[in-house]
Amino acid sequence: MIHLLCEGVGIRAISRLTNLHQQTVLNILESAGEKAQRFLEANVRNVKAEQVQADELVSFVYSKEQNTKPEDVERGSFFTYLSIDRASKLIINWRTAKRSKDDTDAFLTELKNRVAGRFQLTTDSWVGYCGYTGAVRRVFKGGIDYATEAKRYASSNPIFGIRFGRRQVVSVKRTTKIGNPDLRQATTSHCERTNLSVRIFNRRFTRLTLGYSKKLQNLRHAVALFVWHFNFVRIHSTHKATPAQAAGLTTKALTIREFIESAI
C-alpha cells in the first residue's frame, strides 16, 4: 500500500487495486505521512552541503485559485518549496503553503537549521527571495553566499503558449546577491529536475488532470512521504545509491518494511 503511494498511484486506483475503501487508503496515507515527517525531522540534520538550490512548484487544493474565495486559506493554489543539496541530490527540507512572506521565512529558517556550516544558495529571481528586504537576506543575513539565476523562455507552440507548450531557454542571467558565490555553480537546474520527479511520482502534482488534492493536509502527507522515499529508499541514477547515502546520513537504502517497523 505505502509502496503504491510512493510510486505515484492515485487514491482511487489504489482502492481498486487493493480492494480497500478510499477512506482506508487515506487513513494509511495520513499515518505514513506523519511518520515520514517525524523521520525526516529527526534524521535530516547537520547536512554537509556546499551548493544548495531552492525552488517551488505549484499545485492546488480542491479548486483553482480563481474559483476560491479569498478568505479560504486551505483551498486554492499552494506552493511546495524544496531545497536540495546539489552534490547528493538530497531534499534537505520542504514546505507546502501559500507563497507568503511568513511561509518563505519559515522554509528558509528550517533550511538554515538543517545545514552545517556556510554554503552557497541559489534560487530563481523571485523578489520574495532576492529583494533587498527579501527572505534570504532576512533569514541568513550575511551568513551564506547567495546568487540568483533568472531564465527567460520562449515558446514554439502558437496555441498553448509558454505555459503548456514546448519551452526553450533563450537567456540565463546569474547575479551575486550576498557574499562571494561561484557564479559558474549558480544554477537551479538540479532543483527543477527534482520538481519533475515530484510531478512524476506524486499524482497530486500531475498537471491538467483530476489528480489534485481535495484537502490540504492530505497534500502535505503525500509530500512528506515522497520526500522520505526519495531521500532514503529510491536509488538515484547519479550515485547508484540513495541521496541520504550520498550525503552520509545513512549507510544503506531503507525499505518500506523497515519504515513501517521503525519506532519513530
Image (tube, grey):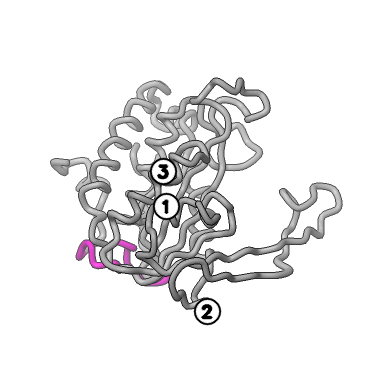
Distance from disc 3 to disc 2, alpha carbons, whole Å, reads 28 Å
State the residue in front, 49 or 263: 49
Residue that carries the numbered disc 1 in the rendered image = 138
Part of the protein shown in magenta: 238-251
Distance from disc 2 to disc 1, alpha carbons, whole Å, reads 25 Å
Mark 1 or 3: in front is 1
Residue that carries the numbered disc 2 in the rendered image = 184
Query: Residue 82: horizontal and vertical position, in percent?
Result: 44, 52
Residue at the location (26% across, 64% down)?
116
Q: Residue 241 colored magenta? A: yes
Question: In the picture provided, is 175 more to the left or to the right than 80?
Answer: right
Amino acid bearing label 3: Arg
Amino acid bearing label 2: Arg
Query: Residue 150: horizontal and vertical position, in percent?
Result: 62, 63
Q: Is residue 244 visible?
A: yes
Query: Residue 203: horizontal and vertical position, in percent?
Result: 51, 40
Residue that carries the numbered disc 3 in the rendered image = 95
Residue 199's tag is none
Q: Is residue 121 above or below residue 137?
A: below
Q: Residue 239 colored magenta? A: yes
Distance from disc 1 to disc 3, alpha carbons, whole Å, reads 18 Å
